[in-house]
Image (cartoon, rainbow, N blue to C red):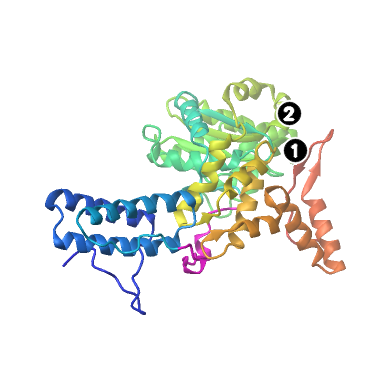
Amino acid sequence: MSEFSISLTSDNTVSSFASLASLRAAHSELLKRHRESGRTSELLKEIKTFICQGRATGALLDADEDRWASQSLLDYWTAILYRAGQEPPDATLAEFDPTLAPELDETLCPYLGLEAFREEKSSLFYGRQRLLEKLVNHLKENRLLAVVGSSGSGKSSVVLGGLLPSLKAGVLSGSENWHYYSPIVPGVNPLENLARITQLRDINATDTPQQQAKRFQKDPNHLAKLSHEFGNRPSVLIVDQFEEVFTLCRDDSVRKAFIDNLIGLIQLPGIRHTVILTMRTDFETQVARVPIFKDLFEQAQVRVTALDVSELREAIEKPAELVGLKFEEGLVEALLKDVLGEPAALPLLQFTLLKLWDNRERNRVTWETYTRLGGGRQALARSADEFYNQLIPEEQITVKRILLQMVRPTEGLEVTSNRFNRQIK
């Protein structure tokens, strides 16, 4: 039986191919059979089937480039039929019909909004290949890496969503077998946070993080000693938002003990332990407050630069391709124009993409949705205003109090994030 026999729907109309890729695969198979067997009556019948199904596929194709490619394939086989003295079926591609497009399940969402990428979302992380290669090359020769960039530049994402999964996959020799501590942020008490992720299995249950923190404070090599639990396996410690050591931690002795333990880990002879930091550029000067660390930090720096047009395009289109999300013609170019050159282009772009996903029409992002959201520059502001304005006055007061506690001004004009318990007094 022919592989390309006519497929009928419930109302006896010819079904379409599932996609342009399916149409091209069928075209390639027909070409192969045409070369092998020539214009047999069976093959001519299959060509007519192909044209009918290919014509119906037009209802699924909205991009001009895809439609031109499809029409050229249909025209090719129409010419073959004419040369064989056969009357071809109508080969005019059907008009695009958005109601026939597949629905995309909410669980397939390919964008993170304002959240940083984490290891579990690494499959959606695109646009940073060149930077990742630079980070990996640095770690080939160095045991300390400081990923430095402006707020919103994507420091945390490239480390947690790109570098960490690459290391665990073996991008460096043997790195798939290394021990990886859970990433931490320093917070108000970085020693206690460090204690929580380095608890040994044989530590008595009564040994609290506070008690363990005192050991870190007394002994600058305590972290290095704890690493012996893993034998000769190198350990990797990631400290995200390292600037909090200076902005949230107010105890100089705790700050110094935390940094001393990091230094002790990477300088332990014989085993290649690694420490990876992320830090905002506007707090770099704070490192001078710890002279013993200053030179190490400067030699460890790799700067996160802004994404260029091709990298931004990849960050938009590649995750969409994974789930079958499509953008109306020219919409990606509009998004690129919106965010290119913006200081916080990545979070702004990701938030806009998430809102466009939430308001998609079946499997498509439309110009109507893009315009209604305000494009890449206004989507975040409009969403915030919409959320705030729908609150009752008492709730608005609570939101103001929460937002004021979420930031902490420092000396000068700098503002950094702040952490507090969810229960508001």
**Residue 304 lies in the magenta stretch:** no
Are discs 1 and 2 less than 8 Å apart at CB? yes
| Residue assigned mark 2 | 286
Choose top left, top right, bottom left or bottom right for residue 150: top right
The quadrant in which the N terminus is found is bottom left
Disc number placed over residue 247 in the picture, else none: 1
Q: At 74% across and 33% down in the image, what residue appears?
A: 252
89 is higher (above) or lower (below) than 305: below
Residue 91: image location, x then y, percent:
35, 60
Q: Residue furthest front?
A: 85
The three-letter code of the residue at mark 2 reads: Gln
Residue 44: image location, x then y, percent:
20, 60
Q: Residues within 10 Å of mark 2 (few under 14, many from 20)?
A: few
The segment highlighted magenta reads: 95-115
**Kind of element beneath mark 2:** helix
**Kind of element beneath mark 1:** helix
> Is residue 46 at all visible to an observer of this figure?
yes
* Cα separation between marks 1 and 2: 9 Å
